[in-house]
Image (cartoon, helix red, strand yellow):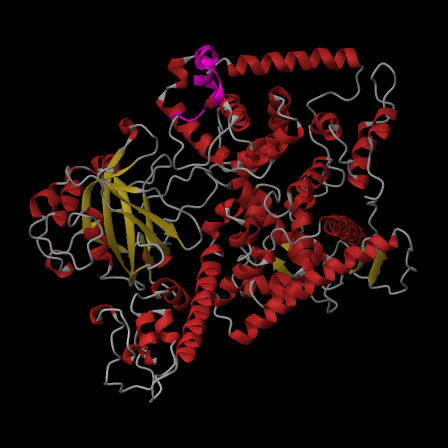
Amino acid sequence: MVEIKRTSGVVESRASHSATEEDRYRLIYSKSKVYVNPTAYAKDNIPGFVALVKREAANSIHLLAWIPETLLNERGTSEWDKFVRIEERATQDEDDDIVLIDLPTQRPESYAFSVPLTSVYSLDVRSPTLSSWYGSIGINLINGDTLPTLHFHDDESRSFTQHSSERKSTVPRVGPKGSWGGEDLLSRLRSYAHILRSTLQPSLFLVDPSRADIEAHSTQIFADDAVDDILAQSSYTNSHSPVPAHRRPRPLSASAASPNPYSHRSSVLHRSLASPASGPQTSSQAHMALLQSFSNITRATRHAAQQILSHPLAKPIIPHLPDPVKSLVNANGEWEWGSWVEKGGVGEFESARVYLARWARIVAEEGERSRRREAQVLPSAPSSDSNEEESSLGVFELLHSTSNLPTPKSSRDTRHPITEEVWKDWFAKDGRPTIRIEEMRQEIFRRGISAEKELRRTIWPFLLGVLEWDVNTTERDRKWRKKRHHYQQLKSEWYGVPEVFDRPDVLEERHRIDVDCRRTDRTQPLFSTPSTSDTESGANTGEKQPHQRYSTISPNIHDIGAQSPSNEHIDRMATILLTFNFYEKELGYVQGMSDLCAPVYVVMDANEELTFWCFVEFMNRMKQNFLRDQSGMKKQLLTLQQLIAVMDPELYRHFEKTDGLNLFFCFRWILIAFKREFPFDDVLRLWEVLWTDYYSNEFVLFVALTILESHRDMILRYLVEYCNELNMTIELDSTLAQAEVLFLSFAQIIADIDRRKAEDPAPSTNGIRRRATGPNTTATDGSSGAGYSLISENLRDLLKTGRA
C-alpha cells in the first residue's frame, strides 16, 4: 500500500512488499471514519479507512492497512465506491464480491500504512468509555515499532450505524456497552490470524503468539477456588467447626479419572497441587501443601514479571520501578538474550551455549580491564607472537588481508588525558594557540579529555569548529558575539510570533520535538529534575505567562498525562531543536536528533547558544544520516559492507550466506554514533574522538568494524541478531584502540594495492587466484595485481581527513 510517515524520516517503510506487476490486491474488509490524530488538536485529525487487503500472488499474504480519505479522493469516485461497497457488504464471505483495488500513490507526508499480519506483534485495544468517547487500537510490530493509533468514530461510520444490528461479533465484547468498530475489526482478524487476549493485560491482544507468549499471557496465576481444593484434602472438612456449612470448603469431586484432577485447570496454583491422597490429610500436611503451592505461585509470578520486563517496550519504565521490581530484571540483558534465542529457533542446548559464550566474554573483558589496571603498576613483558599485538590495551589478534605488511600499533594513551593545565599551556597570553589545530586534534584522539568540571565545555566548541582556533581572544569573542546574535535572530522567527508558533506545520514539529525530548536521557540530572513551575507564586506566574507560552514547546501545555513530565531543561532543549528546524529548513527536525543534542546540552551546562551552535556543527557531520531518502545511511552501510569484504572476507561470506549483507543491525550504531550502545560518559569520550577526524572523517565505520570483529566467532557460529544485544556491554578503550589498528591496517592494504598495481599494471595470468568479494570491490587472499584494481571510491574516501 502506501508508506508510513515515520517521524524520523530514516526508518524504512513497512509497506515495501516487493510487489510485481502480476500481484493483485483484493479488498476483503473496509471500515470508514477511522481517524489518526497526529496532534493534540481535533482539527488536525485525519479520517480514513481501515482495511484488510489480500495480495494474490505466488505467496499470498494478508495486509492490515489504513488509508486516508484524501488518497482515495485522488483516485476518483470509482476507487472510493469500492471501499464503501465492501464496508456495507452484508456477509463476510470473501468470494461473494471480489473487489480488486489499485495501490494508492505513495506520499511521503502521508500517515498511511500497510503491514503484513505476520509482522504485527500485538494490538492495544482501548474500548469506548465515559471519559473516552471513541475507542482506539494501537498496533505494535514485532521489531518494536508502533504504528499510528487508530480511533474509531462509530457515530460517523455509515456501516456501523446502519448495520450494527445485523453484525454479530465472534469475539468477546471489549467495550462496556456492546460492540464497536474495534471489536468488529478484531472479529475479522480472527479469520486470518490467531488472536489471543492477554490475561496479564486485558487490553492487549497478541497476534499469532509464540509458545512462550501463549504460556506467559494465558496462564492464570491464581484461582479463587484453588485454596478450597487444598483445604478440602485435609480433615478440616470433616471436623467439627463453628463455621456454617455453606461457608466451609467444598468437598472434592468423587470422579477423579486422571492422576491429577487439577491438570486441566489453567491456574498455576491448580496445576501445582499434587494428586489427592486416598485418605484424609492431617492439618500439618494441608499446611505444607498450601505453603508449597504459594511457593509455586511466587516462582510463576517472578517468571511472568521477568518476561514482561524483558520486552523492549518495557525498557523505558524500568528505571522508574521500585528496587525490588528492578531486581527481577537480570543484569546485562540476560532475559532479552534468551528471548531472541528462543524466537530464532535455537534449541535449549544451543541457547545455553550461546548464553555461556556471551557470559564468558563479559568475564574475560572484566578480567582484561583488571589486567590493564595492574599493568599500570606492573607492566607485562612484550609478546613475541607475530600474529598478536600486546599493549596496555591487552592482547588481540590482528587481521591480515595482505601478507608481509608491518604490524600497526595503537597510539592511544588514555592514562594521561588532557587536563585543564595542559589546555591552558597551549595558549599564549593573548589567547592565540601555540600549537596547530592538527596537533590539538591528535592529542585529543590519543589521550582523550579529562572529566574535570567544565573542561569539555571549554574544548568542545574548538573541536567542533564553533570557536575559531588560530585567532586571539579579542577576535574570537567578537565572532562569538556575532553567532549569539544570529541565534537570537533565528529564534525570533517563531518565539513571540503567534501566527508562526501556532501554524499547523509548526504545531506538528512542536509535537514531535516535545515527545522526543520528554523521553531522551531522563536519567541525567538536568532532565530528571521535576519542574518547579507549579510552585511559583500567583504574581510571578502571571508575569511569566507569555514567556511560558513560547518556552513550552508542547502543543498543549497541560497535556502530559500520557508522557513523561517536562521541566525547564527539557523545554529549553526543545527550544533549541525547534530553532534548528527553522535554521535547517530543507532537512528540518528528524527523530533521533534529540539523542544527539542531549549530551551536548549537558556538557554545555544548559547554555542555549553554545548548545545550538555545537549541535549545528555536529549535524553538519551527521546530516547525511537523516536524509529522508536514506541515501546517506545506504551509502555508509554499503561502505561498511565493502570494508568488511576487504578486511575480513570470511565474515563477508557469512553475511552473504545468511542474508545479512544489508547490515541493518548496524543501522542504529551509525545513525546516532553509538549513542545507545555505550554508557553516557563513554559516549562523550567516543564522540570527541570521532570529531577529531584524525585518521578519517568516517572513523565511526572502523569502530563498527571493530565491534563486529571482536564478536566474529559468535556471529559466525550463531546468529547475526547477537549484535543487537551488545548495547552497554562494549568496552570503549579497547574498541577505540583496535579501531585505530584496523584503520592503519586498511591504509597499509590500500597503499600496498596501489604500489603493486603501479609495479605490475598488466593483468597477470600466472595462476594467481582472484575473488570478487563485494559490490565494486575486489580483494584477494594475499596476492597482488589486477585483482586489487576495483577498490571502490567509497573505500578510498575513508582515507580522507579534515573538513572544508
Q: Compared with residue 119, is residue 736 higher up or lower down, i.e. above or below?
A: above
State the residue at coordinates (75%, 48%): 733
First to last magenta residue range:
535-557
Single out the residue that lies furthest toward the bottom.
Answer: 278
Please identify the quadrant where the C terminus is shown.
top right
* Residue found 33% across the figure and 63% down from its top: 208
Return the x and y of residue 31 as percentages of the image width and height: 19, 46
Q: Is residue 549 magenta?
A: yes
Relative placement, left or right, of 228 versus 185 is right
Pick whichever, 159 or 235, lies toward us. 235
- Residue located at (39% from left, 35% from top): 561
Q: Is residue 644 left or right of residue 62?
A: right
Assign the magenta stretch its main secondary structure: helix
Q: Depth check: give the residue in front, 232 or 57.
A: 232
- Frontmost residue, 499 versus 555: 555
Tell me, yes or no, if residue 779 can be seen here. Answer: no
Indicate whether 313 appears above or below 48: below
For this view, does 649 lie left or right of residue 231? Answer: right
In the picture, measured across the screen, residue 328 lies left or right of residue 32, that is right
Q: Position of residue 672 (x, y in %)?
A: 58, 41
Please give the name of the residue rendered at 55% of the width and 48% of the height, measured from the top-left corner.
667
Q: Is residue 298 magenta?
A: no
Which quadrant holds residue 296? bottom left
